[in-house]
Image (cartoon, helix red, strand yellow):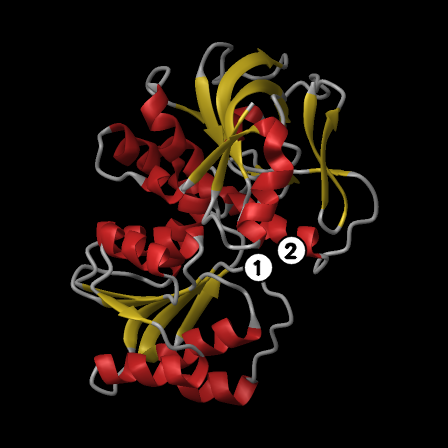
Amino acid sequence: MRGAVLYAPRDVRYEERDDPTIIKPADAVIRISATCVCGSDLWPYRGADRVTGPTPMGHEYCGTVQEVGSEVRSIKPGQFVIGSFFASDNTCPNCQVGYQSSCQHAEFVGGAQASLLRVPLADGTLVATPRVPSEDLIPSLLSLSDVMGTAWFAADAASVKPGSTVAVVGDGAVGLLGVLSAKQMGAERIIAMSRHQSRQRLASDFGATDIVTERGDDGVARIKELTHGVGADAVLECVGTQESMMQAIRSTRPGGSMGYVGVPHGVDLDGQQLFHSHIHLHGGPAPVRRFLPELIELVWNGKINPGKVFDLTLPLDQVAEAYRAMDERRAIKVLLRP
């Protein structure tokens, strides 16, 4: 098969790779229907995360089961499935309390920007849709594999409740779907922080009631102004930089909650400041598997359409252009078709 391989910063190649096979009896091999480029893929692409050798890329996927190992019981060939970027057994103590991304037997699922993918721990990782979906549902179903599941976790971690005021820091795909998640959870007021008109429009489409263009201290001041000096009940941090983390913390009211899902790079938190802020902090790698059944049902029944976050679709052999488009912010998120 052919797939995306990162050799060095800004050097993504579409080249021959070995077909995946069943290695362990709990594995499955799926044929990819759609995959995409994640914002976190841009960290190694830009050189912020070190690449030590040719690295198969991609961790967001949906597709049809081709083959299963001898121990797989609940997943069958022919099913259309979605899985998380972390494989999990879904039975260990951490999985049982809903933190499958911290499964005691977790394995990162990489190499999904290809036509075939091996998924470990298939029974605990993959969730089948009610039947093979129509083509129009595939973008939204694909988003559940990471970006929508991560946004949903940000809102869940921030304790978004009906009637609450929510601020979302970051206007990438996760931030925009954080707006959608907060809306679905019943937030009354949703403040999206964005400087880009196309992203502002999509945020409004997803349910944002206010747009704040300021950043840093000015952004915090604007949130305080909009909330009569109090701050937001819930804040979703969807970037992972020092500025975004501090902006999110300082925008949260005392007693409020902040959910952080942006992969941290260069973030250093002041213990004294946190101590006196009286806010709840919760986040980390999203336990997407926990939310997949509920999110699949919402998509299947037409309650949410997170696939709108894909504003560019390319054939997989143009994966290098997909990375360039996202790196240069010409695209919010690029869907790739093998």
Would you say residue 165 is visible in this rendering?
yes
Q: Indicate whether 272 appears above or below 107.
A: below
**Residue for badge 2:** 43
Q: Residue at x 60, y 40 (%)?
A: 321
Looking at the rendered structure, the kind of residue marked 1 is Val
- Relative depth, front residue between 5 and 256: 5
Query: Does residue 77 appear to the left or right of 129 in the view shown?
Result: right
Where disc 2 sits, the SS reads helix
Foreground disc of the pair 1, 2 = 2
Image quadrant occupied by the C terminus: top right
Q: Position of residue 325 (x, y in %)?
A: 55, 47
Q: Indicate whether 216 appears above or below 11.
A: below
Q: Position of residue 236 (x, y in %)?
A: 39, 64
Marks 1 and 2 close (CB-CB < 8 Å): yes
Marker disc for residue 263 = 1
**Snapshot quadrant of residue 305:** top left
CA gap, disc 1 and disc 2: 9 Å
How packed is label 2: few (under 14 Cα within 10 Å), some, or many (20 or more)? some
Would you say residue 156 is visible in this rendering?
no
Where disc 1 sits, the SS reads loop
Query: Does residue 186 appear to the left or right of 275 in the view shown?
Result: left
User: So how many labels did they put on this image?
Assistant: 2
Q: Residue at x 16, y 64 (%)?
A: 163
**Snapshot quadrant of residue 183:** bottom left
Q: Position of residue 331 (x, y in %)?
A: 47, 48
Q: Residue at x 40, y 72 (%)?
A: 280
How packed is label 1: few (under 14 Cα within 10 Å), some, or many (20 or more)? some
Q: Residue at x 54, y 49 (%)?
A: 326
Query: Does residue 3 appear to the left or right of 193 in the view shown?
Result: right
Looking at the rendered structure, the kind of residue marked 2 is Trp
Q: Position of residue 335 (x, y in %)?
A: 48, 35
